[in-house]
Amino acid sequence: MSNEYRHILVAVDLTKDSQKVLERAVHIADRNHAKLSIMHTLEPLGFAYGGDIPMDLTSIQDQLDEHAKQRLAEIADSHVSRENQHVMVGMPDTEIHRFADDQGVDLIVVGSHGRHGFALLLGSTSTGVLHGAKCDVLAVRVGTGEDGEESAE
């Protein structure tokens, strides 16, 4: 079996640090001649509000989905074809694992704020991504300050 990666998934949160995470994955993909996919996961609005809102959230969810697709394209278009850009709705760790399993991903790349864990991308679900993954996971160090403030590099 080859040590090379064949399909790399970049999971991003759409902040400015997403570009750094993607660039690290692009470098690895280029070296391995690997397919590169990128995804962002939106949490369903019903989860955020406990399903107690007496209104249809579909149009709002659709707007959030469209905004996320536009933002993802801004970040990824120079490196990842549109058909390999994905916006999912669900819990991040679950959706990342499902995509990785379904698409034969052998490396997942995420951003990490160091001692804050994977807070950039997933917050409390970070351990789920790491421990539930059936493939390698690379955490790219991003941000620095205590409050997520950018360092003067």
Image: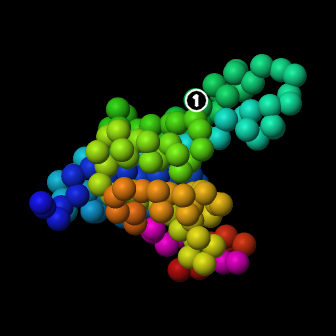
From the viewer's side, name the closer residue of 83 and 122.
Answer: 122
The residues colored magenta run 139-146
Q: Position of residue 103 (x, y in %)?
A: 32, 40
Residue drawn at 29 percent across, 45 percent down: 104
13 horizontally vs 60: left or right? left
Badge 1 element = helix
- Kindly tell me whether residue 75 is visible in this rendering: no
- Left or right of 51 on screen, residue 97: left
Residue 129 location in percent, x, y? 50, 57
Q: Split into 4 quadrants, where in the image is the N terminus?
A: bottom left
Q: Is residue 152 magenta?
A: no
Instruction: List the residue tagged with mark 1.
Output: 66
Quadrant in which residue 31 is drawn: bottom left
Q: Residue at x 27, y 49 (%)?
A: 7
Q: How far from the left and from the top, in percent, is residue 112?
A: 53, 68
Q: Reply above or below: 17 against 60.
A: below
Say which residue appears at 37% left-offset and 34% top-offset.
82
Number of other residues with Cα within 10 Å of mark 1, as a class: few under 14, some 14 to 19, many 20 or more: few
